[in-house]
Every structure is written in structure tokens, then in C-alpha cells.
Amino acid sequence: MIALAQEATIASRNARNPRRGSGRFATVSLLPAQAQTQQHPFTFDKNALRLLKESEALDRQFEKRALVYHDSELQKYLEALSVPLLPKDPLEHVQWKFRILRDPAVNAFGLPNGSIYLNTGLLARAENDDQVFARLAHEISHVTNRDPYLFNRTLRKKVVETEVFEGAAGALFGLSGFYATRHVSGQPDQIGLIAAVTGYPQTFEQKSDENAVRRLRLAGRNPAQLVRLSLLINRLELEPVSFWKNQSNIEDRIAYEKALVGLDRGPDGVSDPGYVARMKSLILDDIHLDLDMRRYRSAVAAAERLVDAYPNDAIAVFWLAESYRSLGPRLEGIRTTYQQFTKFTDEDEANRLAGTPQGKAALDANQKKSEELYKKAASLDPALAEPYFGLGSLYQQQGKKGQAADMYRKYVDLSQRPADKERAKYRLAELTKTLGEVK
Amino acid sequence: MRRTQWFSAVALMCGILAGDAHADFPYINSTLKKRQVTIRKAVVLPAEVAYKRVSLKGVVGGAEESDQIAGAFYFVVTRELAARGVEVLPNPLESAKTDADKYAIADLQTRYDTLRMPLRKKPGRVEHGRITLDDRVAAFTPGIGSDALVFIRADGASMYRIGSLRPDSFRAEVTFVDAKTGDVLALVRFELIRDAAKKSEERLMNGLRDAMHDVPLPNPPTKK
């Protein structure tokens, strides 16, 4: 009881001042989240209700903008996984919903109204069910602990601090608002919601991590997979605009999680073929999103993973080819700086890099890989039209206009989609025009 | 500061205050300017607006107003285009039936947002035809048969009063993209100094009409 009271004091003190706990790790909690909320029933004031209303509006925005990924099988999978994690008694103003967000940023978050979102980027990079379970446990814990409200309340007491945070958040959203999650969540601009999406101060995160580890142990799952997922996030965010702005924060968090689980080195990955099979269509969708957002390195990594699992799947091979072609002169493993990313368009960046010796070498190597892969995809499924369009684009990039025109013709013959056919016909017409001029 | 500069600054301020809105010079692709490309049919993508209400205690919301302004902005753009002789095709989001149709719209909006960063940095590139969404836009089914896709973005805030002043702000931009090649044809921008959540249609229409004044469209601009 004394321990309980002490912990409650620490929790409320940390809630009043979230920075106070940073730098030292909070006492490892041995109490279930439910017990903590029972000790301190949360009272809803005007601001809390406003935050609740904003989170409901955010739910509607995600749905309205078609950012929610609909897959009934995956929905059932997430619901089944979360059953042992939910509190037995209903929480006031919480209705649990588990959704997948079409966003390649490696992230998950829980809104105060009980909507838990897992990004396609996170599910596509996770290796097994334990990692998803750990992440769900972490986010559910934020909601049961009422973290968005507590954090919002703390900051609202300090107007100046709020304004500073808003400025920072504004810069964050303004600069890299192209991630779906950030773009939409930047709109309500409620501090609690921003924190819910992009991360809370250290003390809040640590409490949720502790709860996640406890839940993993209780469910007979491997707690080391929580650390493994953080390592994956850290390693695979190769992009110029990383979702996690502060690299040192995530490294601190990995160190803390290792200490919590009792690991002295990084845990090994446990790749589950069943998990990859379940996520196959989601991974393909995520590759598509990666390519749309100029996240070519992530697209290559995801497509390679899929091809490793399904070496004879024509669609997986096609997407790997497409990813390598899009990667072009960009070097794998080297990040473009954020400044370059915002300054140059995709085309400008590629042209600039192709002018350097390293860029030229990377372009040649990536084009060679993509040509081989396109041909492999076409041989695996001769009825698949897409590899021919890819080959046409590749040859056009290389200045092989005649070969490109042949490939577009094949695509027009095979393609079943009128809109795509029009695109190929337009390219063919342009090419024929220039070929005629040459003759 | 020299007297002429003072005079210009005061005249600009008076102009802004007298008229609620301030339009930037539009960036127009030379192909559109020379009438090598004409916009007769267009698909207007749903507007995306980020609006917040700020009180002395910080930000107090704005999600509902964002929705309301987005609806009004979409309506105003379609009305102005129709007045300028452009046939506006149905709202793609309303005609989307399957998840795949809805995802296609979301993906296109995302691709525009990715392009928007370098576009904002150097908007002058539009005039030289050096900024493009590439011809993948041609595969956007609701856009088949149209000449241009129109993207609408805005952000703004309603601030707390400082004495008798209430420094509200609202920045809006409308981008026209060639529906076949993906080239950005025109970028128009304007600002409002009044609260965009109130009398939205009227205020947005004033700003938009000024901003689109020089964009070559089938009909000449209407008089106020």
C-alpha cells in the first residue's frame, strides 16, 4: 500500500511536470495499469472534453480522407491480439477501436477516445506477432493511463510553455506535413493529440513500456521483441525526413527498454513466415505509399523482404524492380539531407545525383537490377502487364526509345485497365513522334 | 526609409485593410500563358484545410472549422471555375464507391503534398514548366477526360484579441495540374486577414477572384 501511494505520488508529480522524470528512469511499476486508474479516477473537465471531441474529429478526418486501411482479416487479427490487453471494466469516454492507417511512417498511436492506430509502415516492418502485441500494449497503456489528458492538462497550466511547444509542433508539422498522420493530426493542434501521435515525454513513454513488458510476460510472449521493434524502427528509417526527429531520444529509449527487459545486447529477430503471409497485401500497399512519398530506400527494403519470402511471386518481384528503378542514382543507406529533399524535386535530385561518379554508378547498378527483375516478373506471369510498362519507363530513361515503344505496345495489349492504357498510349504517341523526327 | 518606400508600405497596408484579402501574383506555366494548353474541363480534389483557434490559454481546437472552411473553399473554387467557363467534373470523393477508388484520391493528394514542399520553396519553377507530378496522374480514373486537376490547400488561425486588433491569418493556395502530363500549370495564392471561419464563402471568393484574375481560362474574370 505504501509502495502504491509512493508510486501514485511519483506519477502525479511527473504528470504535473513531465520533464522532471527525464534523465532518470522512473521506478519500475509492478501494478497493472487498471489498478492505477482505479486509484485515481480521472475527472473530465472542460479541456478534457474538448480534447475528446477533437480526437473524435480526428477519427472522422482519417476516415473521410481515405487514410484508414480496410481489411477485415487484419481487423480481426488486431482485435484478437488486443483482447488480453484491454481493461476488464469499461473506461469512461473510451470506446476501443483498432485501425490501420495508410501511412509509411513507422508509428502507432492511441487517441484518448480509445482509437488505436497502427501505421502500415509499422506493420510492414514488424517481424512477428509479439512485436505487434508489444506495440498494442504500449498504446493501450497510454489510453488507460489517460496520458493525452494528463499531458494536455500539465501544459495548459503553463501558457508560455504551451506557446513554445506549439511553435515547435507547428514547425514539425509545417516542415514535414506530408506524412498522412502528421498532416491530419497537425490540424486540431491540441497538444495532447500531437503528443499522442508523435510521442510523449520520456516518463510517459517509460510507464507505457513497463506496462507493455509486463503484459508480454503475462501473455507468455517474448518481451525482447519490444526492443527488437524499436531497433527496427531505428535501423529502417533511412529516409531524409525521418518521422522520429530526435535520433538520440529513440536511442535512449532502446537503452532503457534493454535495461527493462534485462538484455545486454540487441535481441535477434524472429521472422515469422505466417506473419509475412498475413501482411502481404499490406506490405505491397505500403511499398506503393513509400514510392509516392519518395521513400525509395524503404520501398527497396520492404520489397526485398517480400521477395525473400516469395521468390516466385511475380507481383512481389515487379515491385522490387519498380523500387530499384525509382531509387535510380540514390545510394542505398545514405540519407538525402532534409534541406535537399525540400529544395529539389524528385527529378532535379535524380539529375543532380546522376551527374556525380557515385550517383552514375548507383544508377547503372540499380537500372541493371530492375531490368533483370522486370524480366523475371514477366517470365513468372506472362499475363501480367505491369512489368512491360516498367521496362518501357526504364528504356525511356536510358534513351532506348525503340525498345521503350515496343514495351509500351506490349503493355497496351495486355493491360485490362483503361486509365493505365491511356497513359501508355500517350507515352507511345510522344515516343513515336520523336522517333519519326529522328528518321 | 525613404519617403516613397513609406508611402508604398502605407498604401499596401491600406489596400489590405480595405479589402480583407491580399492576392500574390500567380505563377503560370508558359504553355498555359501562350494558350498551348487550355483548361476547359477540371476535376477539383477535396480541399485540405488546417485551421486553429487560439485563445490566451493556447490552441483550443479548430477541427470542425477546418471541415467547414474546406467545404466552403471547394464550393467557391468550383463556382469561380464555372463562372470562368470551366466545366467542373463531379467531386471524385463523392463518386468513389470502393476502397480502391478512395485510396486513389488519397494517394494523389499525398503525392501532391510531397511535391508541395519544393513547390513552396521555389514557386517560380512553375513558370518554366519544371515542376511536375509526372504522367501517373493520367491513370487517375476520375480525371479521365479532364484537362486539369485542381488541388486546394489552406492553413490559418483565429487569434485572441489584442486591444481592438484581432490578428487573424489565413493563407490559401490553388494549384492546377495538367491531367495528362502532371505538369503544374498554375499556382495561385492569397491571404485573408479576417477570420476565414466566418462568412467563409464571401471572404474566400474575394481572395480567390483576385488571385485567379490573371489565370488564362476560357472566360475573362468577372467584375466584383
Image: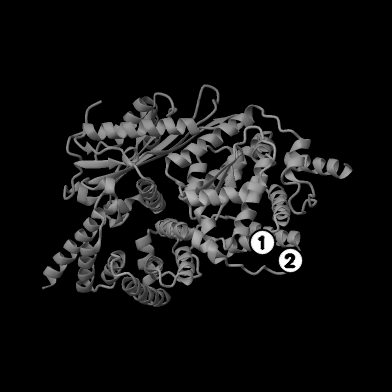
Give the residue pinned by disc 2: A263
The numbered mark, 1 or 2, whose residue comes first in the sequence reads: 1
Residue A325 in the image, given as x and y percentages of width and height: 37, 69
Viewer-closest of A51 and A141: A141
Secondary structure beneath dot 2 equals loop
**Residue pictured at 51% horizontal, 63% vertical:** A276
Q: Quadrant of residue A394?
A: bottom left
Q: Provide the chain ID for the residue under circle 2.
A: A
> In this rendering, does residue B182 appear at all?
no
Q: Is residue B54 left or right of residue B72?
A: right
Q: Is residue A98 above or below residue B87?
A: below
* Callout 2 amino acid: Leu
Question: Left of B96 or right of it: where is A88?
Answer: right
Task: Check contact, mark 1 vs mark 2: CB within 8 A.
Answer: yes
Determine crowd level at label 2: few under 14, some 14-19, many 20+ residues with C-alpha closer than 10 A: few
State how the image is colored: one colour
**Residue A97 percent coordinates (x, y):** 56, 42
* Quadrant the N terminus of chain A occupies: top right
Q: Amino acid at mark 1?
A: Val
Pointer 1 chain: A
At x 66%, y 47%, the residue is A85
Residue B214 visible in the snapshot: yes
In the picture, measured across the screen, residue A286 lies left or right of residue B161, that is left
In the foreground, B208 or A315: A315
Residue A127 marker: none
**Tag 1 and tag 2 share a subunit:** yes
Disc 1 crowd rating (10 Å Cα; few below 14, some 14-19, many 20+) is many
Disc 1, SS? helix
In-front residue for pair A135/B136: A135
Q: Position of residue A45 (x, y in %)?
A: 66, 27
Give the numbered dot on residue A227: 1
| In front of the other: B124 or B150 | B150
